[in-house]
Image (cartoon, rainbow, N blue to C red):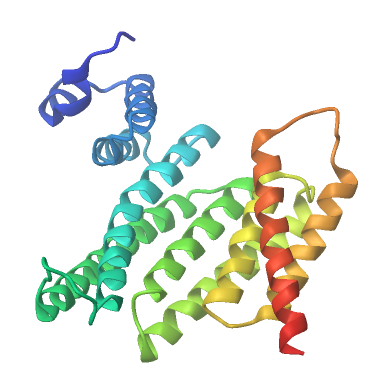
Amino acid sequence: MKWNRTLLTSQEVILKTLYKIEELEYLIKTCLNFEMIDESFFYILKLLELEGPYLSVEERNLLMKTAKGKLSKLRNARKNLLDYEQIEGEINFYSIPKNFVDSEISLLEESIKSFCCNIVEKIEKLEMNIKDDTVAEIFFKKLKADYFRYYAEVCEGAEFNEFVELARENYQNAYEKCLINLEPQNPLTLSVALNYSVFLYFLMDELIQACNISEKIYRQAVINLNTEEKNPEVDALLKSIEENLTLWKIEAIDVN
């Protein structure tokens, strides 16, 4: 398929002329390469409509990447505003009124919650049609847990407790299925272990449990890893787990 900038950016074109799965996949990948996040997410929604209840492995990964990219824009905007609030008191000739900053943070948080609920709803529809596909089941459990975690990050009180429990339940389920059905060096196993341990550390304040999960998977993956077959995705995941584990072990020593 030839490059066409108009094709990438015009929603009218996609609505009227593009109906083939391979064309949508091409557009999603190309938009991701050019960091056109809004466009890539628009096309993934059209892909979901055309594909119906089943997504291939590649299409599942595209859903994960586009949704994460879309949400990252909201999370980064919120983080920037929170960082701005922390410089209060410093000399700033272009200061923004605090009530305006607070209002914008609140709007972003509501947008994050709405987006997370929307993605979870789509995932649950996909889950309903999984038959004898353990990898897909694990993938969707992990992805759903991620969005429960993102939701929990922007709320507190009873709402926070509700969503961290939903995240924990889905992470735990995905993690246990990985241990039973997948190799420890499988990228999905590593991804589940990484995100589950990050969740336990940052949202649940369970340092030791986060260390235990990270160390168990890391050691088993390294032992079983075929050093002759290079896998950049596996290498990147192992590096992230190792970096977290190093920092957390130091913290655990300091705590004790």
Q: Is residue 19 visible?
A: yes
Q: Residue furthest front?
A: 91
Q: Position of residue 27 (x, y in %)?
A: 32, 25
Horizontal relation, residue 195 to residue 243: left or right: left
- Image location (x, y in percent) of residue 53: 41, 43
Residue 233 image position (x, y, % from top left): 64, 38
Left or right side of 218 for 7: left
Reply above or below: 208 against 237: below
Q: Quadrant of residue 244?
A: bottom right
Q: Position of residue 189 (x, y in %)?
A: 69, 52
Residue at position x 41%, y 67% in the image:
150
Residue at 69 percent of width and 72 percent of height: 248
Inspect this view and state whether residue 132 appears.
no
| In the rendered image, the vertical position of residue 155 relative to residue 245, given as above or below | below
Q: Which residue is at a point 63% across and 57% down the rendered structure image?
A: 192
6 lies above or below 187: above
* Snapshot quadrant of residue 97: bottom left
What is the quadrant of the N terminus in the image?
top left
Query: Along the line of sight, which residue is nearer the eye, 121 or 223?
Result: 223
Residue at image point 25% right, 39% down = 42
Tell how many labels. Answer: 0
